[in-house]
Image (cartoon, grey):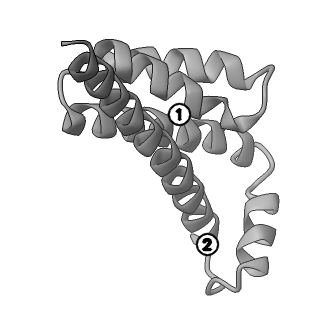
Amino acid sequence: MLFLLIAIVSLILQLFLPWWIIAPVAFVFAAWKAKSAKNAFIGGFLAIFVVWIIAGLVHTIPNENILANRVASMLTLPSSSLSWLIVLVISGLIGGLAAGFSALAGRYAKEALASSKG
């Protein structure tokens, strides 16, 4: 459930807002729905990793990976027919880590607030 909430809301909001909207979305939904810290991190990480990989594929396949290959050459990645895929995985990891740590912070914030009340 956490995975779907973060993925769907982040995908919709990223159409209108900056990329970093994934952090507050993951924070709020993990604070609300996560059952554990592990669940929060994995749910946030996988949701954005999958969304960003799919979005990258939707944008790069129609233009025959031109931009992704140029980014790969700027990053001095080895020139191969799959260098664009490495760029997609790197971007997915960056977004996934940002969302995962934000979701983890949301879960810990909920625990901190709950322990301070009682």
In this orientation, which residue lies closer to the viewer: 48 or 110? 110
Quadrant of the rendered structure where residue 18 is? top right
Q: Position of residue 88 (x, y in %)?
A: 59, 56
Q: Residue 51 bears which disc, if any? A: 1
Is tag 1's residue or tag 2's residue first in the polypeptide sequence? Answer: 1
Alpha carbon separation for disc pair 1 and 2: 20 Å
Q: Is residue 76 above or below residue 41?
A: below
Q: Position of residue 37 (x, y in %)?
A: 23, 36
Q: Is residue 88 above or below residue 43?
A: below
Q: What's the amino acid at mark 1?
A: Val
The residue indicated by pointer 2 is 83
Q: What's the amino acid at mark 2?
A: Ser
Q: Residue at x 32, y 39 (%)?
A: 41
Image quadrant for the N terminus? Answer: top left
Tell me if label 1 and label 2 are in contact, CB under 8 Å.
no
Question: Could you say whether the residue bearing mark 1 is in a helix, strand or loop?
Answer: helix
In this orientation, which residue lies closer to the viewer: 108 or 11? 108
Q: Position of residue 102 (x, y in %)?
A: 47, 38
Q: Residue at x 18, y 21 (%)?
A: 35
Q: Position of residue 82 (x, y in %)?
A: 57, 70
In the drawing, does residue 92 fall left or right of residue 105? right
Tell me the crowding category of disc 2: few under 14, some 14 to 19, or many 20 or more residues within 10 angstroms, Cα based: some
Marks 1, 2: nearer the viewer: 1
Q: Residue at x 78, y 24 (%)?
A: 17
